[in-house]
Image (cartoon, grey):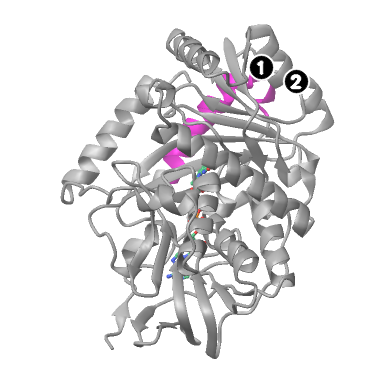
Amino acid sequence: MTLRQVCRSPVHNGPAAWSEILGPAAARPALAGEVGCDLAIVGAGFGGLSAARRLRQIAPGTKVVVVDAGWVAEGGAGRNSGFMIDLPHELTSHDYAGTGEGRDKILTRLNRQAIDWAGEAVRDYGIPEGYFQRSGKINGAASDVGQRGNTSYAAHLSALNEPHELLDEKAMREITGTGYYRSGLYTPGTAMLQPAGYVRGFAEGLARDGVTIFEKSTVLRFESTGSGWRLHFAGGTLSAAKVILANNGHLESFGFKQGRLMHIMLNACMTEELSEAQLRALGGKACWGITPSDPMGTTVRRISTAQGGNRIVIRQGGYYRPDMETSAADLERLRVRMRQKFEARFPMLSSVKFQYAWSGHLCLSKNGVSLMRELEPGLFSACVCNGLGTARGTLYGIGAAELACGQTSDITAFFLEEDEPVKLPPHPFDTIGANAYMRWKEWQARLE
Ligand SMILES: Cc1cc2nc3c(=O)[nH]c(=O)nc-3n(C[C@H](O)[C@H](O)[C@H](O)COP(=O)(O)OP(=O)(O)OC[C@H]3O[C@@H](n4cnc5c(N)ncnc54)[C@H](O)[C@@H]3O)c2cc1C
């Protein structure tokens, strides 16, 4: 049995702010000694925890152990913007409006299934309502290009009988308090998460339901034992008949799909808590979420006490980093840029400081596919979020659990029909090309 090395472990830059604002959670132990189970899941994010819940539903007698290199919600789960989105960003494809059920249409239906399924978990696990709100989102437009994008998107939605509402400048100001946006396009299907609260509550629910979770337990090596798999940690080993790798881009660190996965480090900032006077100066509603009409633009959220404080969260700018790390200099450059974006939108809040700035890792494939499949006998993957892992991660987690139990569904069928991620140009050409492309697209979307 060859012992295979995991070449890289997650490294975080900046705090997982969504988790920080909730205060510390009760720590779980790290894996120690020799532990055995039927099914081991690597990664306690959206993918891994969804897989564990699905296993509880379809194979309740299965002994499930989840391990994560960090604390629950310290990784991507505590670093994202919390939009659990049903619709694709582009609706211009013939595929969507065609007569058959094209890929976008299927994915929209599955995303809605994932959001419903997550809503059931919220009820079952007693997760606070403020951590999962089916309140929809607004596509904000601040330029002519953005307005044209929203108008065209709205026309497609009308043709498809999808509910939506076009908002004018006044309506946008009444919601957000800022006069920055010239129009908006509201769609009701997105669930807005306090992502760390949701994931922490999910993990607590699973633990009450008999799933064992080990934190600060990094898989360092792994091997096939013939009858199953053994994972090696600093303090012990975990043997399992089957394993689901739900570690997103770190699938590559386990030696799979090398040269095919794109690692993007995305960045965000969160303000300190706004005072009563600052809230009055801002005006608008207590809770809203804006995605940019151009995906390379700036995402902005206003959250309130139900999510951990009256604050503004802003996300802008990413780097292509095959080593899955950002530097302090990367983050500082983007913090300065996010400050400019913040002040352009909220001149009345110029005295408000950013309390947190952070980077997070997401994984894309050039052809937009995820990896939910059996990699080797008994070894499954639920990875490659393509930037939308709150919904997609939920889906590939469900799918991997079903696949590991020999079940089929619309979800397994969708992922199993996907192609392989296409090959990327060799280093450093991939890095140079991707970063140049991203800077150019960000420049084009600079007002959005
Ligand atoms: C700034 C930012 C904003 C974003 N906004 C959104 C958004 O609004 N909506 C959306 O849908 N998505 C968003 N995303 C993307 C989203 O965060 C990811 O898609 C999602 O977290 C993927 O979930 P996952 O469970 O597949 O992987 P992850 O959340 O990355 O979880 C994988 C887990 O595997 C663990 N792991 C890795 N290697 C090992 C190892 N060797 N041993 C043990 N454990 C290991 C990691 O610690 C990690 O916790 C955003 C991301 C960023 C960075």
Magenta span includes 343: yes
Seen from the viewer's position, the closer of residues 122 and 273 is: 122
Q: Position of residue 259 (x, y in %)?
A: 22, 55
Asked whether the beta carbons under mark 2 and mark 1 sit within 8 Å of each other, the answer is yes
Mark 2 element type: loop
How many C-alpha atoms fall within 10 Å of the one at disc 2: few (<14), some, or many (≥20)?
Answer: some
Q: Is residue 224 above or below residue 438?
A: below
**Kind of residue at badge 1:** Thr
Residue at (66, 17) in percent of width and height? 178
Magenta span includes 206: no
Tally of numbered discs: 2
Q: Quadrant of the N terminus?
A: bottom left
Task: Look at mark 1 in the image and give the residue it sits on.
Answer: 178
Task: Look at mark 2 in the image and give the residue it sits on.
Answer: 284
Q: Earlier in the sequence, mark 2 or mark 1?
A: 1
How many C-alpha atoms fall within 10 Å of the one at disc 1: few (<14), some, or many (≥20)?
Answer: some
Report the span colored magenta: 331-351
Q: Is residue 104 above or below residue 122?
A: above
Decide if residue 198 is on the left or right side of residue 38.
right
Can the viewer see residue 33? yes
**Kind of residue at badge 2:** Gly
Residue at (70, 47) in percent of width and height? 119
- The image quarter in which residue 130 lies: top right
Residue at (45, 73) in percent of width and height? 243
Q: CA distance from mark 2 to mark 1?
A: 8 Å
Q: Position of residue 219 (x, y in %)?
A: 44, 76
